[in-house]
Image (tube, grey):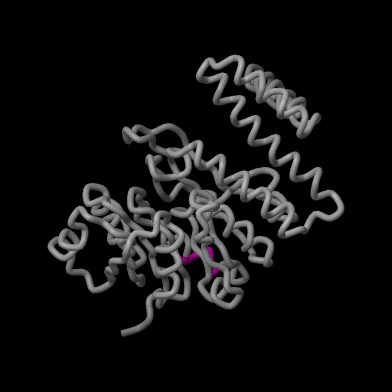
Amino acid sequence: MKSPFFSVIIPTFNRTAKLPICLNSVLSQTFTNFEIIIIDNGSTDNTENMILAEYEDYRIRYFWQEGSGSPANPRNQGIHKARGAWVAFLDSDDVWYPEKLDNVYNQIQDQSETDVICHNERMFDQTNQYTHNITHVRKADDMYKSMLLDGNCLSPSATTIRKSFLTEKELFFNESPDFAIVEDYDLWLRLAKNGAVITFIDKTLGDYVVDGGNMIGDWQRYITNLEKLYEHHAFVVQDFEPEKDKIYNQLIAKIHFQRLKKALKERKCSEALKEFFKTLRKSPTFLPGIILSKVFFVFGSTRS
């Protein structure tokens, strides 16, 4: 049996209702040389029996393990078990469009130097209602600094990585509780810092579903983890001497601004005012820049 070109890594936990939709989207791919590695992170909802009863495809490999509390460990286990040259991640409540792997394969053939590939997605809320399109495409001379200062531009279910780049440089998802919800963002940053060539497919090739256990669904925990990530990359990684304090303050200002927006949305005016001044103290130029960009955006929209 020849080795698969792609290893599709699907971590799951108690999702017997959603996992078949996810799996069927992979089995419907027009590119067929892949394996599916399901890492069951301690499910108690009969996931294994469901898979054995409904699927006989030899490409599906199922592994059960004790729950680890975050997707980092099951994703890492999937990388270690992968037999493919490329690993593609897919959360068990997300889906791919049939031509996803074909598009990624063609990108690899066209740009042989690439190490990481990401495409666009559609976002759905917890009630499965479409909200908006997510464009991941970004151009930057310094992708590491861009992703840290301008925000994450990759997404697990939209990202495929050359396995040898991960294993040779020992780059895996951070399993620390401090990074439990930002473990993917941290890995993308470390990939960029280690010189990974990141390319993008400007097509929508999958659907991302917001769930209570992911980043957006668990907002407060995400913000706490994000602060730890900023601290780690500003002070431990230390690529930004001698301006690391300034950069760290800019990053923390972004967190206060997120809290400011949330407080305004919830009509918590006193809390919003506190976050406003915290933002200004951390980075006096941050809020004016944000406000100006919003004004220009609105002005441009009214003229178009």
Q: Nearer the viewer, residue 288 or 34?
A: 288
Residue 24 image offset from top left, x and y in percent? 26, 56
Indicate the quadrant containing the N terminus: top left, top right, bottom left or bottom right.
bottom left
Q: Residue furthest right?
A: 242
Count up the numbered dots: 0
The magenta span reads: 105-109
186 sits to left or right of 246: left
**Vertical position of residue 244 compared to residue 34: above or below:** above
Q: Residue at x 64, y 64 (%)?
A: 197
Q: Residue at x 37, y 41 (%)?
A: 211
Q: Residue furthest bottom?
A: 1
Q: Residue at x 67, y 36 (%)?
A: 254
235 sits to left or right of 70: right
Residue 169 image offset from top left, x and y in percent? 61, 74
Q: Quadrant of residue 99?
A: bottom left
**Vertical position of residue 284 compared to residue 164: above or below:** above
Q: Nearer the viewer, residue 193 or 181?
A: 181
**Vertical position of residue 49 compared to residue 165: above or below:** above
Task: Say if the magenta span includes residue 107.
Answer: yes
Residue 140 image offset from top left, x and y in percent? 71, 52
